[in-house]
Image: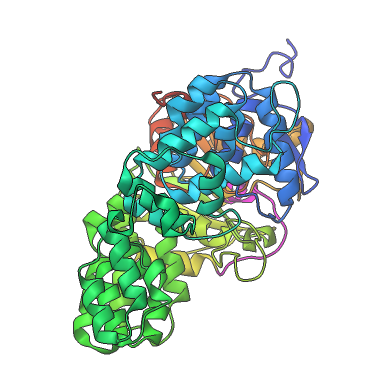
């Protein structure tokens, strides 16, 4: 008989692990384009459980050097900003592109730098000197080409965008204006630049104070008002000015109540406790207004907020925040998950609840700046959203043990996620949900398995030098073929929430690895499970320049 190990089918052949992950376990190394996409969709330049911010930057720069495809860098910058909704990584990719292909950089600049926060990040990254030019020299100032991009942005941005960009320091918008040195397109813009850089009015010539945009004049009048009534009156007619520029000077509850009616639903969601402290929620009228705004379907879809951000607001809401508003957060989370498609069949959802998943999903940024939303919270919300739209699926939380989680798919997403996030806390063995499915659900047919993890499995190993996940996956496929016939093609999807470069299952026809925690991930999963060979890198490369 021929050697079956040597001549096994590609699907049944176990691939030997070729890397060691940051937790010390067997793993598979992603190819550079895939690894760069993983980092771009999850990285925040903050300390993660197994990685420092410095190491994250070094790995990003190393991967960028390995990807000799400027169009891919441009597309990935757009993907990271517009589909993964990241802030720092798209800016970093844009800066890298600026020293490799200035024409492409100009082509995508405005699609990546869509607000002042990203503009300031791009400026800071350039000023840091960490990105080198083609000659290998650090670039600290703005090159003439990048300077033109900044000048164009500053001259075409709306007044509201410029005012929003003025929030924050180090760098400040004043720093950017002084280095970019844009030539004002008219006296209104000349006066605006003068005011933003704190120049004396006589240096605005030929512009005068009268040339300042109406919004700026109203903002100045608001800050100079001496009474609560006068401030409330001004705020009532003030549009396109972020509430952050108004709140520090607010003189009383009337002003705060007026502010609450002017700010966006995202700001309302993020500042419920602040509104509570300033007595905005003291009347049923304002409670109804805030609840209706938070749960407004049109605003939720337009805001591009992650579903987990409503979970954050719900978890952080003060006990005295009215229940009607908390109920609105539940409704908003359901709407935000509305793009989660129905999968081609039930799936096994493996939910990593190990100790490393208790770290902040956006990394440790120091006291007061670190998000309270943990990786486990995001993973639980992913699992809850999939279960909500695919109620015959099975959720299996795991660390070094697999847990029997009985969930009612008709419960609210936030309630399901909150319960799931309470499991585990130990080491990591990503093979366990597959093993549990093989043992406890061996008579059920599944379209596949979705693992939500940071992929830092270190407990247990697989056969033939493979990972435990690969060994357990082969057993899962074999069992599904016994149930549904040899034509059964279950798929394994591994969602990675952290910017690491190794995975537990190697890429192949029936396995996909994808990083990130936005709604876009769900669409890729759905296509893949429906036998459309849609891949993470292919999703990036599909971006139109």
Q: Nearer the viewer, residue 475 or 452?
A: 452
Q: Which residues are magenta?
A: 422-436
Residue at 56% over, 50% down: 175
From this view, report whether residue 193 is shown above or below residue 345: below
For the residue pair 98 and 213, the one nearer the viewer reads as 213
Residue 271 position, x and y percent, is: 40, 73
In this rendering, would 105 be left or right of 463?
left
Q: Position of residue 325 (x, y in %)?
A: 30, 76
**Residue 424, magenta (yes or no):** yes
What residue appears at the point 25 percent right and 59 percent down from the top-left corner? 214
Question: Taking the image as drawn, is residue 263 in sight?
Answer: no
Tell me: residue 245, above or below residue 446: below
Between residue 358 and residue 14, name the one nearer to us: 358
Placement of the C terminus among the 4 image quadrants: top left
Q: Nearer the viewer, residue 182 or 524?
A: 182
Q: Quadrant of residue 407?
A: bottom left
Q: Can you see residue 222?
A: yes
Horizontal arrangement in the rendering, residue 405 relative to residue 220 (left or right): right
Task: Check residue 109 for magenta coloring.
Answer: no
What secondary structure is the magenta-colored segment mainly?
loop
Indicate left or right for 103 with 187 as reference.
right
Horizontally, residue 245 falls left or right of residue 479, namely left
Q: List x then y, in percent, for residue 134.
A: 70, 21
Q: Residue at 42% across / 42% down in the picture?
A: 154
Rendered residue at 77%/49% (across/down): 23
Residue 508: x %, y % from top left: 58, 25
Q: Quadrant of the N terminus?
A: top right
Labels in figure, total? 0
């Amino acid at each position: 008989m021929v050697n079956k190990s040597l001549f096994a089918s590609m699907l049944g052949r176990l691939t030997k692990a070729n890397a060691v992950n940051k937790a010390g376990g067997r793993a598979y190394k992603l190819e550079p384009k895939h690894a760069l996409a993983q980092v771009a969709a999850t990285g925040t330049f903050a300390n993660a459980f197994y990685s420092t911010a410095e190491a994250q930057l070094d790995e990003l720069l190393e991967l960028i050097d390995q990807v000799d495809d400027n169009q891919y860098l441009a597309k990935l910058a757009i993907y990271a900003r517009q589909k993964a909704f990241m802030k720092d990584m798209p800016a970093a990719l844009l800066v890298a592109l600026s020293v490799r292909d200035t024409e492409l950089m100009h082509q995508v600049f405005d699609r990546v730098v869509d607000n002042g926060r990203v503009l300031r990040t791009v400026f800071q990254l350039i000023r840091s000197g960490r990105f080198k030019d083609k000659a290998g020299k650090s670039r600290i100032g703005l090159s003439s080409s990048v300077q033109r991009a900044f000048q164009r942005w500053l001259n075409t941005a709306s007044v509201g965008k410029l005012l929003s960009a003025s929030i924050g320091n180090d760098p400040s918008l004043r720093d950017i204006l002084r280095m970019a040195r844009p030539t004002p397109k008219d006296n209104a813009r000349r006066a605006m630049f003068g005011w933003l850089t704190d120049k004396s009015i006589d240096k605005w010539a030929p512009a005068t104070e009268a040339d300042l945009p109406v919004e700026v004049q109203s903002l100045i009048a608001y800050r100079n008002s001496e009474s609560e009534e006068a401030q409330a009156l001004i705020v009532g007619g003030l549009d396109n000015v972020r509430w952050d520029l108004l709140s520090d000077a607010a003189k009383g509850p009337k002003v705060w109540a007026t502010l609450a009616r002017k700010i966006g639903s995202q700001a309302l969601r993020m500042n419920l406790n602040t509104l509570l402290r300033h007595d905005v929620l003291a009347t049923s009228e304002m409670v109804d207004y805030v609840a209706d705004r938070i749960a407004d379907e049109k605003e939720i879809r337009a805001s591009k907020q992650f579903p987990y951000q409503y979970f954050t607001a719900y978890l952080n809401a003060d006990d005295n925040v009215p229940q009607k508003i908390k109920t609105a957060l539940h409704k908003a989370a359901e709407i935000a998950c509305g793009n989660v498609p129905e999968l081609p069949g039930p799936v096994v959802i493996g939910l990593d609840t190990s100790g490393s998943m208790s770290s902040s999903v956006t990394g440790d940024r120091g006291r007061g700046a670190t998000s309270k939303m943990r990786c486990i919270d995001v993973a639980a919300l992913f699992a809850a959203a999939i279960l909500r739209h695919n109620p015959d699926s099975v959720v299996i939380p795991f660390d070094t043990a697999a847990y029997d989680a009985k969930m009612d798919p008709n419960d609210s997403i936030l309630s399901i996620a909150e319960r799931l996030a309470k499991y585990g806390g130990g080491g990591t063995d990503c093979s366990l949900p597959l093993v549990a499915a093989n043992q406890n659900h061996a008579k059920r047919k599944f379209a596949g398995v979705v693992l939500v993890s940071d992929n830092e499995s270190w407990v247990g190993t697989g056969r033939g030098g493979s990972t435990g996940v690969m060994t357990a996956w082969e057993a899962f496929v074999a069992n599904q073929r016994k149930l549904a016939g040899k034509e059964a093609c279950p798929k394994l999807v591994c969602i990675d929430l952290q910017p690491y470069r190794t995975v537990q299952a190697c890429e192949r026809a029936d396995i996909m690895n994808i990083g990130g925690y936005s709604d876009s991930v769900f669409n890729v999963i759905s296509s893949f499970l429906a036998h459309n060979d849609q891949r993470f890198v292919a999703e990036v490369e599909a971006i139109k320049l």
